C-alpha cells in the first residue's frame, strides 16, 4: 500500500512540475510580449525620416489594416525613410499588442497584403534575434519593384517595404531595421 501511495505521490508531483513548467513559459512569453513597443526612429538604417503627407497617408493606411486584424494595439508605427530621388525609399508599418497566435496573424496579414499589392510567394526567413515568424517576398506596385518583409511575434506585427529593390535586398536589411522598430520596454 505504501508503494502505491508513493507512486501516486510521485506521479502527482511530477505532473504538477510539468504543468508549472509549461504555464511558467506561457506566462513569461505573455509578460515579455506585453513589454513590446514599435517606434519610428529619427533615422532608419542610415536613412532620414520623411515628412511628406502623401507618403505618411500611405503608411497610416498600412497600419490601419494591421490594427483591424489584431484589435488590441498598444502602440503603432507608420513612416517612410530615405531619398526618393535616389530610389532609396523604405516604409515601415507595425503595431504592438498581444497576439495569441502569431503565425495565424501573419498568415492573415500576408493574405490581405497579397490582395492589395502584387506580391509573389512570401518565403520564411530567420526572425532572430527577436523571434516569431518572418517572411520576405518580391512585389510591385504599378511599375515599382518592392522587397517586402513581414513579421509577427507574441507582441507585434509589422512590415518593411523597400521600394525599387528586391526581396533579397530587403532580407539583407530586415533584421537591422526590425531591431530599430521593435523595442522591449
Image (spheres, grey):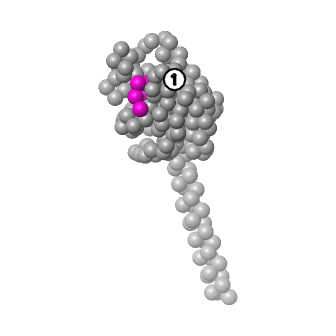
Which corner quadrant of the image does residue 60 belong to?
top right
Residue 71 percent across, percent down from the top left: 64, 32
Magenta residues: mostly which secondary structure?
Answer: loop
Residue 90 can be seen, yes or no:
no
Residue 17 percent across, percent down from the top left: 56, 66
Q: Secondary structure at mark 1?
A: strand
Residue drawn at point x = 57 percent, y = 36 percent? 110
Q: Is residue 165 magenta?
A: yes
Which corner quadrant of the image does residue 51 belong to?
top left
Q: Closest to the observer: 4 or 59?
A: 59
Q: Residues within 10 Å of mark 1 (few under 14, many from 20)?
A: few
Q: Closest to the observer: 106 or 156?
A: 106
Q: Is residue 63 magenta?
A: no
Which corner quadrant of the image does residue 43 belong to?
top left
The region drawn magenta spans 162-166
Q: Residue under circle 1? A: 141
Q: What residue occupies the far left of the structure in this picture?
A: 46
Residue 57 percent across, percent down from the top left: 53, 16
In this image, 85 relative to 147: left or right?
left
- Quadrant housing the C terminus: top left
> Compared to 122, does 4 lie above or below?
below
Residue 58 can be seen, yes or no:
yes
Q: Closest to the observer: 53 or 180?
A: 53
- Quadrant housing the N terminus: bottom right
In this image, 34 relative to 185: left or right?
right
Residue 145 percent across, percent down from the top left: 45, 26
> Compared to 81, does 4 lie above or below?
below
Residue drawn at point x = 52 percent, y = 39 percent? 121
Amino acid at each position: 500500500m505504501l508503494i502505491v501511495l508513493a507512486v501516486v505521490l510521485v506521479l502527482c508531483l511530477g505532473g504538477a512540475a510539468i504543468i508549472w513548467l509549461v504555464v511558467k513559459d506561457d506566462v513569461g512569453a505573455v509578460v515579455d510580449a506585453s513589454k513590446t513597443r514599435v517606434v519610428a526612429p529619427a533615422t532608419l538604417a542610415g536613412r532620414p525620416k520623411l515628412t511628406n503627407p502623401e507618403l505618411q497617408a500611405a503608411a497610416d493606411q498600412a497600419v490601419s489594416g494591421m490594427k483591424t486584424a489584431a484589435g488590441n494595439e498598444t502602440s503603432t508605427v507608420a513612416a517612410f525613410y530615405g531619398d526618393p530621388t535616389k530610389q532609396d525609399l523604405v516604409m515601415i508599418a507595425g503595431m504592438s499588442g498581444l497576439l495569441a497566435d502569431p503565425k495565424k496573424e501573419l498568415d492573415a496579414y500576408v493574405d490581405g497584403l497579397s490582395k492589395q499589392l502584387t506580391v509573389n510567394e512570401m518565403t520564411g526567413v530567420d526572425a532572430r534575434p527577436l523571434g516569431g515568424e518572418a517572411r520576405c517576398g518580391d512585389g510591385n506596385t504599378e511599375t515599382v519593384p518592392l522587397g517586402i518583409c513581414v513579421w509577427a511575434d507574441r507582441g507585434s506585427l509589422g512590415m518593411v517595404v523597400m521600394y525599387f529593390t528586391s526581396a533579397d535586398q530587403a532580407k539583407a536589411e530586415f533584421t537591422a531595421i526590425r531591431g530599430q522598430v521593435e523595442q522591449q520596454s
